[in-house]
Amino acid sequence: INYIANKFTQQVGYGNAIGFLVNKGIPMEPPKDSNSGNDNINPITGQYLSAEDTGPSLADMTDEEKEREAEKLFVLFERLKKTGIVDVENPIAKAMREGKLEEIQDEGSDSD
């Protein structure tokens, strides 16, 4: 069975297969660091490394592009939160609400 589980993870990727295998009670070993053969395959996604979309580098993005990407992420997290899939919360807002953060006066600015 271990051979079948390993073959399955090679075909669909460790990240995709592990949940199924655990739910079915099928034992398997984690993927090895080296790939068999000359195929450069990501063991988590099961995709060829050359085919994976890495997206734009932050260094190559303008400030406007970075802001758009941040807004997209915010919208996606809000959707996940509304559907109940994940419970995400701004850690700064949470810390302020719980009283773990306090405002500190800047020493350089004298308001007297």
Image: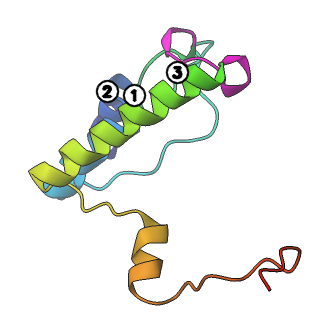
Q: Earlier in the sequence, mark 1 or mark 3?
A: 1
Residue 4 vs residue 59, the one in the foreground: 59
Q: Earlier in the sequence, mark 3 or mark 2?
A: 2
Residue at 52% across / 21% down in the picture? Answer: 41
Q: Which residues are magenta?
A: 50-61
- Where does residue 22 sit, x and y in percent of width and height? 23, 56
Mark 3 → mark 2, Cα distance in angstroms: 11 Å
Q: Residue at x 34, y 23 (%)?
A: 11
Image quarter of the N terminus? top left
Outermost front residue: 112
Name the residue tied to disc 2.
12
Q: In the structure shown, which secondary structural element does the residue marked by tag 3 occupy?
A: loop
Residue tagged 3: 41
Q: Residue furthest bottom?
A: 99
Is residue 72 toward the left or the right of residue 67 in the image?
A: left
Residue position marked by numbered label 1 in the rendering:
10
> How far is disc 1 from disc 3 in space, using C-alphas?
9 Å
Q: Quadrant of the C terminus?
A: bottom right
Seen from the viewer's position, the closer of residues 43 and 106 is 106
Which of the 4 image quarters holds residue 107? bottom right
Q: Which amino acid, by three-letter code, is at mark 1?
A: Gln
x and y percentages locating residue 98 in the rendered image = 40, 87
Give the class, few, some or many, for how many residues have Cα within 10 Å of label 1's Cα (few <14, many ≥20). Answer: many
User: Measured from the top left, where is residue 101 in percent x and y?
Assistant: 55, 84
Observer able to see residue 44: no
For numbered disc 1, what is the local secondary structure?
helix
Residue 41 visible in image: yes
Q: Farthest residue toward the right?
A: 108
Going by the numbered disc 2, the residue's amino acid type is: Val
